[in-house]
Image: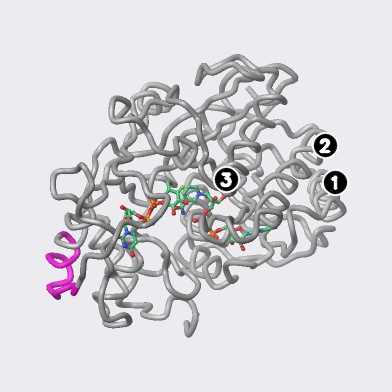
């Protein structure tokens, strides 16, 4: 147990909570009865996502400053940067001064575009590594030692065909600065837990730290209401938002990067996980940490099922009842043929597994795209 709290109603800090994964997770955590403080600098999001989360959860969104002026209510938004140590200290100290110390952090804030990370490695290390280190320093100082960290299947690099589906013990071999920054943040968390260099995915930790490093596979889709979803800036790098934008007529055609991969139909295979399944995985990881002895957990969040590029195209065509024009192009540099999770450990440890299919993903992603053809860009609340 954590202090005198059993996690049934915790005060949580959600960094990057206005983003794609953070906004859906905020909704699930509010529905579970937790109080949330969101810290976001809006470098890749806007407050509209959180206004919509508040509407779906039936709670008001309170806006405040890092030095909180009012008692935090169910859902409070603070604009700030995770690299700003004064901001972090003010937030932890003022929550405590209002009698509501932060029990745990869910740390989504970060930069995530692989190509951009190759162009701007210093920026990626600054936000993803220095930002995480400053957050952990503030947590340590304020005796908040429970964190769920957004890691990535990108750490597995080009997985060996013998290791599909990929277990957490597969070799870690990042192949770009984004992956390297997630690897560094994972290593820092292991050092804090006193588990440096130990590969076991479940370990007792020291110093009171409760840590979950969650390695996401390919999170896609949207909340079934169509009110919140993924809103990429500019031309999407990722397959799923690109396909929905073609289906809705915002882009003329999809480029399929290679049909000569060693896969059943020659196109790349990925493990697509519905964003609501992912959000529920965070709830379960948090509850598991809050109710156990200090430990370091490293878990894949995936479905264990692979879908090819052409398989996703067909599924979206069936859902949208629209043709999705596509043409085959050469392979994209840096891509792996297949990445599919072995999700057994998360099932054992969290009693969690994905509930939603590729059909559900397409239905909900399509509803979001149709209702918000320009994302949150031209949205009326
Ligand atoms: P996102 O860009 O939608 O959300 C990230 C949020 O963090 C945004 O709201 C952004 O404004 C905020 N942010 C960025 N830098 C910040 C800073 N310095 N201070 C405060 N806030 C900051 O991305 P997402 O898809 O929701 O991803 C969330 C996390 O999950 C990221 O750490 C990402 O690396 C990781 N992840 C994402 C995927 C994916 O496919 N979406 C896969 C694996 C891992
Ligand atoms: N693809 C296309 N056309 C496109 C975009 C993608 O054919 O326009 C293909 C890719 O070649 C790949 C598959 O669709 O075979 C999936 O590609 P995504 O870009 O959607 O996803 P990735 O698996 O390459 O990478 C994503 C994130 C990473 C993250 C990883 C694991 O971009 O940051 O999932 O979570 F690390």
Q: Quadrant of residue 304?
A: top left
What is the secondary structure assignment of the residue under circle 1?
Answer: helix
Say which residue appears at 26% left-offset and 46% top-offset: 269
Say which residue appears at 61% left-offset and 66% top-offset: 61
Q: Image quadrant for the N terminus? A: top right
State the count of labels: 3
User: Dots 1 and 2: beta carbons under 8 Å?
Assistant: yes
What is the secondary structure assignment of the residue under circle 2?
Answer: loop
43 in relation to 22, above or below: below
Q: Is residue 38 left or right of residue 225?
A: right
Badge 1 or badge 2: first in the primary sequence:
1
Q: Which residue is disc 2 drawn over? A: 142
Q: Which residue is disc 1 drawn over? A: 93
Q: Is 319 inside the magenta-drawn segment?
A: yes
> Can you give x and y, in whole percent of width and height, for residue 89 in the image?
85, 48
Cα–Cα span, label 3 and label 2:
20 Å
Cα–Cα span, label 3 and label 1:
19 Å
> Can you give x and y, in whole percent of width and height, for residue 246 in the image?
27, 75
> Can you give x and y, in whole percent of width and height, for residue 261 in the image?
23, 47
Q: Is 57 inside the magenta-drawn segment?
A: no
Q: Is residue 102 left or right of residue 24?
A: right
Q: Which residue is disc 3 drawn over? A: 34
């Amino acid at each position: 147990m954590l202090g005198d709290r059993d996690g049934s109603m915790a005060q949580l800090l959600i960094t990057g909570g206005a983003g794609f994964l953070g906004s859906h997770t905020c909704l699930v955590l509010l529905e579970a009865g937790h109080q949330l403080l969101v810290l976001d600098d809006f470098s890749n999001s806007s407050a509209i996502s959180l206004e919509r989360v508040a509407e779906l959860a039936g709670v008001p969104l309170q806006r405040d400053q890092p030095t909180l002026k009012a008692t935090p209510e169910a859902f409070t938004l603070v604009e700030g940067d995770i690299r700003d140590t004064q901001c972090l200290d003010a937030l932890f100290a003022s929550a405590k001064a209002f009698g509501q110390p932060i029990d745990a952090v869910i740390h989504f804030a970060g930069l995530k575009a692989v190509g951009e990370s190759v162009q701007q490695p210093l920026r990626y290390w600054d936000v993803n590594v220095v930002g995480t280190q400053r957050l952990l320093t503030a947590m340590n100082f304020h005796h908040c030692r429970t964190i769920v960290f957004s890691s990535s299947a990108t750490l597995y690099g080009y997985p060996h065909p013998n290791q599909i589906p990929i277990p957490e013990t597969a070799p870690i071999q990042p192949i770009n600065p984004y992956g390297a920054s997630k690897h560094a943040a994972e290593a820092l968390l292991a050092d804090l837990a006193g588990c440096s260099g130990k590969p076991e995915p479940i370990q007792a930790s020291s110093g009171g730290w409760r840590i979950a490093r969650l390695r996401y596979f390919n999170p896609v889709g949207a909340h079934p209401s169509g009110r919140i979803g993924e809103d990429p800036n500019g031309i999407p790098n990722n397959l799923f938002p690109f396909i929905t934008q073609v289906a809705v007529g915002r882009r003329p055609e999809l480029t399929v990067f290679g049909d000569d991969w060693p896969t059943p139909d020659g196109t790349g295979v990925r493990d697509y996980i519905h964003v609501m399944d992912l959000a529920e995985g965070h709830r379960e990881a948090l509850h598991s940490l809050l109710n156990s002895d200090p430990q370091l957990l490293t878990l894949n969040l995936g479905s264990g099922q692979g879908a090819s590029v052409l398989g996703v195209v067909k599924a979206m065509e069936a859902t949208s009842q629209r043709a999705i024009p596509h043409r085959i192009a050469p392979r994209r540099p840096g891509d792996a043929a297949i990445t599919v999770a072995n999700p057994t450990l998360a099932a054992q440890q969290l009693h969690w597994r994905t509930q939603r299919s590729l059909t559900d993903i397409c239905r909900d992603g399509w509803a979001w795209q149709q209702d918000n053809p320009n994302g949150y860009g031209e949205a009326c609340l």
